[in-house]
Image (cartoon, grey):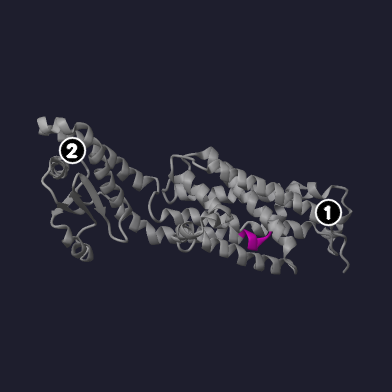
Amino acid sequence: MFLNSVKLLVRRKQAIFWAAIFPLVLMVLFYFCFGSINEQENCIDARKIAVSIEGDSMYEKNFKELLTTLNDQYKNGESDLDLDVTYCDSDKFKELFDKEEIEAAYKVTDGKIEILLPARYKSATGMIVRQIADTYHVKYSIIEDAISKDPTKIMEIADKVQENVSYIEVDEASSGKDPYFWYFISTVVMGIMFNYMAGIYIVNNLRANASYEGMRIALSPESKFKLIACNFFAALLVNSLISMGHLAIIEFVFGKSVFAKPGLIIVAVVLSNAFSISLGIILAFFFKGNVETKVNKSLGIIMVMEFLSGEFIADIPGTIEKYCPILNRVLPSTVIKMIFYRLTTWDEVGDLYINFAKLAVAVVIMLVVSAMLLRSESYESV
């Protein structure tokens, strides 16, 4: 029964196309469109920075000294961080940004550092300038007295900055923490959500109707729940393998790390695919008509969820979070995307297990309800 269910699912060319082929095509397009951009953003070319020193305290003077020390380290071959620094008044920043002559700017005054970035800034540059400022601010308060007695102590800060920035350079290039990585993860999840089709096909296969398969199911001594479970796990196996295949392509072909937490990734793949299949089963009962009609109507719902979860415009979840945050907590596509994005880009798991629990509970409820609905149906006439 299990193998037969697997064969029936694999023969559904439409389901295989949307779940496996279509997301893969999109990822290839993303790679060729964004890959070179990401390499340019995360290379170790000179970071063009403007600095406005507005004050004459030791804090401002030593920050300038820090930037000079970092440049000296680069020139001496002790560092890969190349800073192209322009010193000017802060009122010239806008002009320099408009001419694209700088990528970031520092305004140093009154014992604090203000960072200015253009609307569309390079991810690596943004992280580097923040790391320099944060490291200086934290370390300066600790060794301020030592600097006043021995100016060479500025090297301690410079070494710490270089250590942190070197990590950012490697991390940006290898782990995929770039503005375009979201689209790869989002597309994998879109493929998972398309597995709702498997759920619709399961209901179609198990419903009593005038077909040979329908009559066989109607006369089967097996319980409806057992039949659903068998077909459900068959679909779950096939679709989980497809999802793992997509992630493996991102890792080994596109060179973006996604398996830093392999155990949790597998759990996420299984739970998210279980949810999409269960959702398809429920939608099959909700919509009327033949299989194609149900698939098409359900596709409309899935595409709306994908749009709201940032598949086409990555900033949409952020906008929703600002005006209606509850929607991000309950929208399945967003919940699943944040699970995968957290697992592949963040060290902390945060609310990961809560989201796992949400999916698991939803799957159990939908499977129980679908089994009850299927059991209540009578044999259809021709």
Decide: is 241 above or below 141. Answer: below
* Discs 1, 2 touching: Cβ within 8 Å: no
How many discs appear?
A: 2
Predominant secondary structure, magenta span: helix
First in sequence: mark 1 vs mark 2: 2
The amino acid beneath tag 1 is Arg
Stretch of the chain drawn in magenta:
11-16
**Badge nearest the viewer, 1 or 2:** 1
Query: Is 7 rendered above or below residue 263?
Result: below
- Give me the disc on residue 78: 2
List the residue tagged with mark 1: 375
Label 2: which secondary element: loop
| Picture quadrant where residue 264 is located | top right
At 16% from the left and 53% from the top, the residue drawn is 52
Left or right: where 362 falls relative to 319? right
The residue at the point 76 percent across, 54 percent down is 370
Quick check: can you spot residue 355?
yes
Looking at this view, is 89 or 55 the one in front? 55
**Which structural element holds mark 1?**
helix
Q: Quadrant of residue 156?
A: top left
Q: Is residue 142 above or below residue 209?
A: above
Question: Is residue 296 rendered magenta in the image?
Answer: no
In the image as oriented, which residue stretches furthest toward the front? 110
For label 1, the crowd category at 10 Å Cα-Cα, with few meaning under 14, some 14 to 19 and many 20 or more, is some
Horizontal and vertical percent position of residue 209: 84, 63
Query: Percent position (x, y) of residue 83?
Result: 19, 49
